[in-house]
Image (spheres, rainbow, N blue to C red):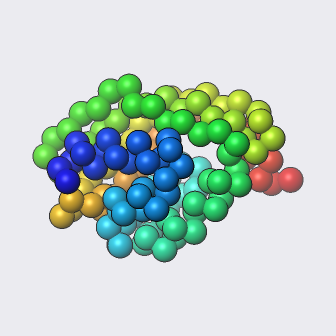
Amino acid sequence: MNTREVIDKYYESANAGDWDTWLTLFDDNVVVDEQLAGHIEGIEIMRGAIGGIERGYSKFQNNPQHVVIDGNEASVVSHISAANATGVPIEANVANYFRLENGKIAYMANFHDTRPFDPFVNQRLN
C-alpha cells in the first residue's frame, strides 16, 4: 500500500473497530507519541492498548478533515466524536503525524486539546 492507502485504512479500520486490520498497518518496532497514553514503543504495546480503547469508549469516531501526504509522511487534521464508557460525549480536534517505512507506520504522534477528554481521564482514575 502507498502512504495514502495506509492513512485511509488507518481511519477506516479504527472507525469500524477493526483492530486486527488496524494493527497490520504498524511496523513491529513502531514508536508512538500519544498525548494521553504517552510514549509507546512496539506493536505488542499497541496490541495491548486495544483493550483499553474498547473498555474506555462506548463510541469512537475519528474523521479526517484535511490530509497532506508528502512521500512517506502524512499529516492529518481530524475531528473525534466519541463517548466514554458511561456515555459522556467527547468532541475534539486532533492533528496526527505519520512516518511510514516499507509501507508500515513506523512513527506516529498526535496533538489535541486534552480538555474534552477530561471525563475519560477522570473515569479511568476513579
Q: Is residue 62 above or below residue 28?
A: above
* Front in this rendered view, residue 78 or 10: 10
Whether residue 38 appears in this view of the structure is yes
* Residue sitting at x 49%, y 36%: 62
Counting from the top left corner in percent of width and height, residue 89 is at 71, 30
User: Where, by quadrant of the figure, is residue 63 drawn?
Assistant: top left
* Residue sitting at x 49%, y 57%: 19
**Drawn side of residue 16 relative to residue 69, left or right:** right
Q: In the rendered picture of this protein, how many numbered marks are placed on residues?
A: 0
Whether residue 116 appears in this view of the structure is no
Counting from the top left corner in percent of width and height, residue 39 is at 49, 62
* Residue sitting at x 49%, y 29%: 79
Q: Is residue 29 above or below residue 61?
A: below
Residue furthest out toward the right: 126
* Front in this rendered view, residue 20 or 68: 20
**Drawn side of residue 116 relative to residue 62, left or right:** right
Counting from the top left corner in percent of width and height, residue 109 is at 40, 50
User: Where, by quadrant of the figure, is residue 74 drawn?
Assistant: top left
Residue furthest out toward the left: 71
**Drawn side of residue 4 relative to residue 18, left or right:** left
* Residue sitting at x 59%, y 50%: 36
* Front in this rendered view, residue 7 or 95: 7
Counting from the top left corner in percent of width and height, residue 55 is at 71, 54
User: Where, by quadrant of the figure, is residue 107 drawn?
Assistant: bottom left
